[in-house]
Image (cartoon, rainbow, N blue to C red):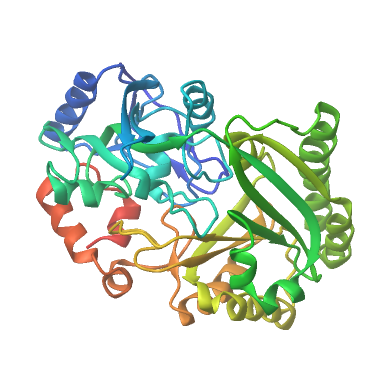
Amino acid sequence: MTTSAPTWTNWTGNVTAHPTSRSAPTTVAEVTNTVLSAAESGTRVKCVGAGHSFTPAAATDGVLMTLDDLTGIESIVPTRGADGQVDGADVTVWAGTRLHRLGPLLWDLGLAQPNLGDFAEQSLAGAAATGTHGTGLREPGIPATIVGLQLVTADGSVLSCSRDSHPEVFEAARLGIGALGIITKITIRCVPAFVLQAEERPWSLSAALKDMEGFARSADHAEFYWFPHTDAINLKRNTRLPGDSDLAPVGRLQNLVSDEFLSNEVFDAVCRAATRRPSLTPRLNRITSRALSARTFTDRSYNVFASPRRVRFREMEYAVPLAAAGAVLGDIRDMIDRAGLNVSFPMEVRFAAADDVWMSTANGREVCYIAVHQYHRMDHTELFRLAEEIFLAADGRPHWGKMHTRTAEDFATMVDRFDDFVAVRDRLDPARVFGNTYTERVLP
């Protein structure tokens, strides 16, 4: 169904678009018809999920398509390891399925995604298109778990892609930033359902910087948040346990106080105070860092990976080589102090295994992801500019869905398979039906 469309904004409000119409298909045939109609009239089409990207990746002046009516699990094919035993399954999922809905569906089938990011509102297609990742040097990001996908291209073709069928399209489309077509189904490699034992506690940045790689390998999934202007971090170590392990989740009252009240309501009030009086930021950060106490809990994996995010912010995230992580973070700390910046939002530090996805920020190397945030009511410009200089000096690669200033010329030297990706895009979409201002900047 296609209707007129009001102005669209992304989750954080830094991207605004004025589409001519909005399409909400309920079948693949309707997706195809919308694409063909747009192509014939010279109109562009972009697909949007939760709008969580901080870039204009989904913005369009043409047809804005949502796949919210293409959701759920279509099929399951068990997989077997070298010993012949079932070790998981390849699960085909409709592309509009939100991750917070997919987790419980998989759990009921005895399955789980091997890793997830910390924002569960994303659609599966949106998470794949921008290279969403979690943390843990044993596991890659979401695109690397894709073993098949269905793609509607600009000429109306519906391609079923895998390593064995349209392999070059498959390799490009696993992380395609929406430039190749509309993904309608994704087949992901899932593992047996597992539980995570979560440890969260205060620590110091100076201790973490002494051995960043050691910290990264200290648990199945390790990460930390650093509060600028302090030496305080809040570390998170998640250890995988069998799916039938006893659960000890965060209690309702503790969740209300810690995750809802302190992490959202109070934190938003703190950021508002820092916006009104920036000079208070260091003191407020010290207070905030002390408010988060240690806790340990055990829950289903998808409940532990993600947490509620209601305080809006701007974000830049780069993947730097693991060996450079400590120096990069130390340089950012020194830069903030030297430049006299006021940064009220914690920085997030995560890790990922190397993968072979063409456009992945972790292609061919283990990486540390360093995410620089600024509250949405505060100016992020100088912080992001100076941080990006540090990231680039360390051979960093920008997250496709986070703010950055890189162009196609930069990516041509930064991404090994960039020319291969562009060749596939040129073949599938010569008229740029799926183009927009973002693809015009990052692709030739």
Number of numbered discs on residues:
0
Residue 101, percent from left and from top: 51, 25
Foreground residue among 303 and 442: 303
Residue 197, percent from left and from top: 68, 43
Name the residue rendered at 60%, 29% in the picture. Answer: 244
- Left/right placement of residue 305 relative to residue 167 reads right
In this rendering, is residue 18 above or below 201? above
Q: Is residue 338 visible?
A: yes
Foreground residue among 73 and 88: 88
Q: Quadrant of residue 423?
A: bottom left
Name the residue rendered at 15%, 48% in the picture. Answer: 167
Residue 371, percent from left and from top: 58, 61
Foreground residue among 215 and 373: 215
Quarter of the rendering occupied by the N terminus: top left
Name the residue rendered at 17%, 23% in the picture. Answer: 33
Q: Residue furthest front?
A: 83
Quarter of the rendering occupied by the C terminus: bottom left
Name the residue rendered at 47%, 26% in the picture. Answer: 106
In this rendering, is residue 44 above or below 109? below
